[in-house]
């Protein structure tokens, strides 16, 4: 993984010192809240319902054991002993004191972490395929380019005050695990006809109150010219994106209003102006960054067959089935650590669990970890022969739920339990659904399913692209929940359709089960929920959901 | 009848606090001073704004309450969440204990 150079160290320390001074001036009254708010947001500190919330950046979801131990330490010393993995592959702490912030940032800096650009109208943490560098279906490791984007976009003077926040995702695999098409920019590494590697560039995807699927504006961009092309897109957006209405300020609205072809022409024209301007990195610098992401020293293992890892323990076999994915290296596998035990808030992890996972990463995964946008963790490089021991340890610490990609692998935002923007709670709904479907055999019978919950229209819980999406609303002072069906964030990305009127808080879990029963009754052999929905459409679900109204 | 109190977040740690009868700020709603007229509410808000200037709290505002036989209850759902904290069970009663304010 990338290690800070002297510049990185100096710049992060400088920011900590600046923020220490800013906090002191706020506490002394020298700065008003209006003056201070943009400064704290630039350092990832929000004021939420019950306390300050700190969002720490995990660049493209990559963590080391040392960093995770540090996060565990922070959660104990400055929070309530847990953290929450977010849909941007970051981690949030919900109970931070303003007076502790500078010391906390100092500790983060010790392990090459910070909270810069986890808020504000700037380029946010670039996300990536969480199996990057390990996936069997990978064309090329996207982390190299994520890191290049990180360095380019951090405190970029031109792009620190964009019309609105800006999110970029990169994937180097054939399967889209990074939700590229619901990002402001999605970058897909691919080969052209000559066999060269470059990027398909998609622009204008997003969720929120106006969900849109990104449009491809360039089928193939040579890798070496990524930064100049990104700079061109951002410049057009910065100049032409709307600043008069925050709800119409994202680039998706610009793409919609101009049309993708017109936007592509503007970007191309700008690019022709800047592509020779030395923004793009020299080959030697790209090669230097690539070296940080060189594969670990894999051992040639004899037990290359996953079946050989099975040991007759049915629970372990279920975990292998659901949570273990194919690795590009013979004899190795990718293990997903589900943070979705039944009845618990999705994405939460205790300090003790963080330390257990850090130990496992060190012992069994070359000191590498990933946070996923689906709010789980990943051990990317585990020898198949070590999987049983890894699983046993996970099981002993409540981390072995065999539910990756099943109904209980719920994405949920913090909702009104924490968030000052929310209109309803998400976490209690998630906990009740996961309790209702706790039987793993039931979950497996239902099969592949993505259920996403947002506590407001800002859609941080990605409800628009859930196969089943749930949106929490405030209806005359009471929580109510709208269901969407058919959303997806993969290569066939689609926005879910609203199935009908919202359900009250005490009816929403029953409604989800009704959707499930409708699917189970009418599915064809081997047909996943999302495929059944594509075949059946909304009506059979709607009929059954509202049969008594 | 109109019944309002003042809530805010404490500057130093962001915790939910209520303006008390003696002009201080408390984490317990039972200590909150109530206003029963527009004039009283305006006076409370003015006092709270002084606490903003003094760097004690952030963003104070009026919270509408229901008086249910001596047990105060915030009318808005959001305020009940702020009062009870996260993780409140969905079916939890929205009425507060007059003794504890929770």
Image (tube, coloured by chain):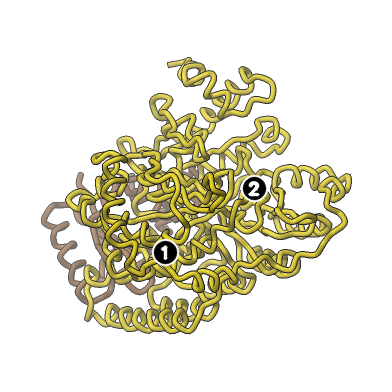
Chain colours: A yellow, B brown
Q: Numbered disc 2: what chain?
A: A
Residue A6 showing in the rendered view? yes
Residue drawn where x is 45% and y is 77% of the image: A105
In this rendering, position of residue A34 left or right of residue A416: left
Badge 1, how many Cα within 10 Å: few under 14, some, many 20+? many
Residue drawn where x is 62% and y is 57% of the image: A377
Badge 2, how many Cα within 10 Å: few under 14, some, many 20+? some
Residue drawn where x is 53% and y is 64% of the image: A144
Q: Numbered disc 1: what chain?
A: A
In this rendering, position of residue A365 left or right of residue A14: right
In this rendering, position of residue B75 left or right of residue A416: left
The quadrant of the image that shows the C terminus of chain A is: top left
Closer to the camera, A49 or A61? A61
Under circle 2, the secondary element is: loop
Under circle 1, the secondary element is: strand
Location of mark 1 (residue): A53
What is the quadrant of residue A441 in the picture?
Answer: top right
Residue furthest left in the image: B39
Q: Is residue A10 above or below residue A353?
A: below
Q: Position of residue A147 (x, y in %)?
A: 49, 66
Closer to the camera, A468 or A287? A287
Dot 1 or dot 2: first in sequence order is 1
In this rendering, position of residue A308 left or right of residue A201: right
Q: Are marks 1 and 2 in contact (CB under 8 Å)?
A: no
Q: Position of residue A226 (x, y in %)?
A: 42, 59
Q: Position of residue B64 (x, y in %)?
A: 26, 49
Location of mark 2 (residue): A137
């Amino acid at each position: 993984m990338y290690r800070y150079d002297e510049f990185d160290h100096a710049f992060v320390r400088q920011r900590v010192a600046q923020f220490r001074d800013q906090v002191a001036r706020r506490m002394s009254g020298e700065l008003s809240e209006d003056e201070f708010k943009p400064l704290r947001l630039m350092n990832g500190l929000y004021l939420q319902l019950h306390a300050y919330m700190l969002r720490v950046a995990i660049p493209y979801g990559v963590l080391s054991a040392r960093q995770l131990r540090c996060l565990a330490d922070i959660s104990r010393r400055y929070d309530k002993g847990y953290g929450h993995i977010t849909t941007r592959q970051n981690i949030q702490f919900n109970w931070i004191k303003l007076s502790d912030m500078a010391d906390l940032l100092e500790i983060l800096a010790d392990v090459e972490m910070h909270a810069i650009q986890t808020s504000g109208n700037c380029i946010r943490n670039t996300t990536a395929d969480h199996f990057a560098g390990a996936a069997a279906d990978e064309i090329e490791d996207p982390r190299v380019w994520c890191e290049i984007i990180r360095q380019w976009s951090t405190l970029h003077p031109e792009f620190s005050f964009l019309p609105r926040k800006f999110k970029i995702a990169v994937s180097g695999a054939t399967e889209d695990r990074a939700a590229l098409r619901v990002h402001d920019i999605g970058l897909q590494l691919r080969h052209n006809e000559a066999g060269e590697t470059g990027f398909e560039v998609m622009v204008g995807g997003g969720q929120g109150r106006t969900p849109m699927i990104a449009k491809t504006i360039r089928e193939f961009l040579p890798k070496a010219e990524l930064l100049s092309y990104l700079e061109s897109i951002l410049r057009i957006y910065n100049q032409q994106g709307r600043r008069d209405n925050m709800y119409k300020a994202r680039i998706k609205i610009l793409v919609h209003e101009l049309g993708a072809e017109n936007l592509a022409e503007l970007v191309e024209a700008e690019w022709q102006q800047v592509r020779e301007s030395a923004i793009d990195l020299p080959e030697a610098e790209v090669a230097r960054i690539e070296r940080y992401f060189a594969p670990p020293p894999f051992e040639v293992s004899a037990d290359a067959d996953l079946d050989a890892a099975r040991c007759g323990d049915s629970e372990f076999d279920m975990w292998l089935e659901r949570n273990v994915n194919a690795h590009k290296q013979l004899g190795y596998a990718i293990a997903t650590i589900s943070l979705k035990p039944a009845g618990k808030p999705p994405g939460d992890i205790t300090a003790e669990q963080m330390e257990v996972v850090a130990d496992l990463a060190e012992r069994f995964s070359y000191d590498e970890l990933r946070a996923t946008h689906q709010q789980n963790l990943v051990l990317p490089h585990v020898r198949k022969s070590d999987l049983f021991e890894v699983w046993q340890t996970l099981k002993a610490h409540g981390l072995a739920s065999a539910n990756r990609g099943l109904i209980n692998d719920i994405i949920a935002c913090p909702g009104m339990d924490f968030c000052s923007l929310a209109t309803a709670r998400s976490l209690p709904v998630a906990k009740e659904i996961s309790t209702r479907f706790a039987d793993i055999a039931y979950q497996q019978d239902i099969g592949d399913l993505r259920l996403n919950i947002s506590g407001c229209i800002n859609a941080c819980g990605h409800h628009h692209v859930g196969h089943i999406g749930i949106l929490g609303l405030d209806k005359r002072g009471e929580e109510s929940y709208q269901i969407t069906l058919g959303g997806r964030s993969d290569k066939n990305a689609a926005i879910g359709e609203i199935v009908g009127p919202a359900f009250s808080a005490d009816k929403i879990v029953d409604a989800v089960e009704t959707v499930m029963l409708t699917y189970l009754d009418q599915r064809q052999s081997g047909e996943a929920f999302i495929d059944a929905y594509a075949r059946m459409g909304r009506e059979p679900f709607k009929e059954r959901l509202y049969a008594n109204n | 009848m109109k019944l309002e109190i003042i809530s805010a977040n404490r500057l130093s740690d962001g915790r939910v606090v209520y303006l008390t009868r003696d002009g201080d700020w408390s984490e317990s709603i039972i200590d909150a001073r109530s206003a029963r007229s527009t004039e009283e509410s305006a006076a409370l808000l003015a006092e709270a704004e002084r606490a903003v200037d003094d760097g004690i709290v952030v963003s104070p505002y009026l919270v509408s309450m229901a008086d249910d036989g001596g047990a105060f209850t915030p009318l808005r759902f959001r305020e009940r969440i702020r009062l009870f904290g996260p993780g409140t069970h969905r079916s939890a009663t929205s009425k507060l204990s007059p003794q504890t304010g929770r």
